[in-house]
Amino acid sequence: MLDDTDRRLLRHLLDDPTLGPADLAGRVGMTRASAARRLARLQDTGVIQGIRARIDWRQLGYSVEVSLRVSLDKTNPRAFESFIAAAREVPEITEIQTFLGRVDVRLHIIARDMGHYQDLYRTRVLTLPHIADIEALMHVATIKAGGRLPL
Amino acid sequence: MSLDLDSTDRQILRLLSHDATIAAGAIGREVGLSQPAAWRRIQRLEAAGVLAGRRVDLDLEAVGLGVTVFLGVKLATKGRVSLEDFERAVTAIPEIQTVEHVLGLYDYRLRVVARDLADFERVLRRRIMALPGVGDVEANVLLSEERRPGPIG
């Protein structure tokens, strides 16, 4: 479905997501119109799902980041759905992932400080439905982020 | 030091975290500001580092990277030197998208992409298990992922 030109276009866009069709056209060596057409097609077919702003929560005073690894009580057939629906109601939860493995769901949660985190953990996390077990990994530092996809 | 946001700033952040390519004029219309006023607010959020660049979300399956795995890694030997060796080596592996140093059951969290499970097995055996100081490794295969707007509501 993707040809080499699409891949080249995507590589340049991933390297610098601020590039518009004109900049990309120059780098890939095509006309502005055909770059715009290819980009539109990649968006229409859902290959590019979105170009979104990244928010640095630290700059807004959220200095605590925790990865919560949750195992659910699978005896309840609706455990995943109701757990995820309830997690969506917690604004401080910024990512929800489901897995095949020892962990069922991972929540990425941010808090202003440890006091705030403790409060969130007790009043908003432990009250989520169907939790069988929960483990926390406290974020210390990001060593690598936004690694280039091997396209 | 953190920036104080009013409800218009939050609205702007919500719009841009959904689609970063919206022009200042369109944002202004959405939040009830003139184009220059919206542009000034976006500039202020960028200058304060709140708007920290852009992310392109791809359908990884469609670009031939059908498998994403999160790995929890525990180091077998610790000490400053082994952390540095591990971090240097792990950062150089192209299939590894993110590396986070964490506290808890594991020392590092890695996000790995691969073409398929066979390709992931190759990366795991040849690259990750060969990292200096690597001990216990736990793998969880990503089934679905959802990013939420965060506390800007």
Image: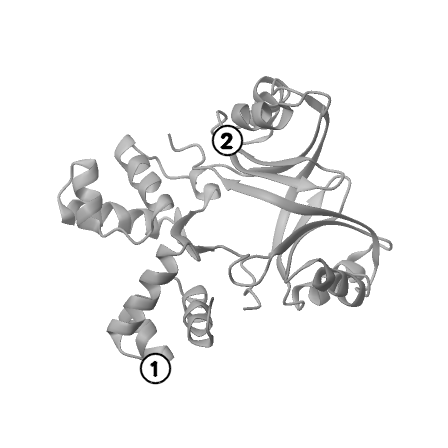
How packed mark 2 is, by other alpha carbons closer than 10 Å (few <14, some 14-19, many 20 or more), is many
Left or right of A68? Residue B126 is right
Foreground residue among B139 and A144 = B139
- The residue at 31%/75% (across/down) is A25
Determine whether the residue tagged by mark 2 lies in a helix, strand or loop: loop
Left or right of B7? Residue A128 is right
Amino acid on which the number 2 mark rests in the picture? Glu
For marks 1 and 2, give the one nearer the viewer. 1
Relative height, residue A69 to residue A20 (above, below): above
Disc 1 or 2, which lies upstream in sequence? 1
Please say whether residue A18 is visible from this viewpoint.
no
Residue sitting at the far left: B34
Q: CB of mark 1 within 8 Å of CB of mark 2?
A: no
Determine whether the residue tagged by mark 1 lies in a helix, strand or loop: loop
Residue sitting at the far front: A1
Q: Position of residue B60 (x, y in %)?
A: 53, 57
Q: Position of residue A140 (x, y in %)?
A: 65, 45
Relative height, residue A69 to residue B107 (above, below): above
Amino acid on which the number 1 mark rests in the picture? Gly
Relative height, residue B33 to residue B87 (above, below): above
Residue, disc 2: A92
Q: Position of residue A71 (x, y in %)?
A: 72, 30
Q: Quadrant of the N terminus of chain B?
A: top left
The dot on residue A117 is: none
- The residue at 45%/46% (across/down) is A56
Please say whether residue B13 is visible from this viewpoint.
yes
Residue, disc 1: A29
Q: Position of residue B97 (x, y in %)?
A: 60, 59
- The residue at 86%/55% (across/down) is B77
Left or right of B117? Residue A26 is left
In three-dimensional space, the C-alpha distance between marks 1 and 2, rounded to whole angstroms, equals 44 Å
Foreground residue among B101 and A109 = A109
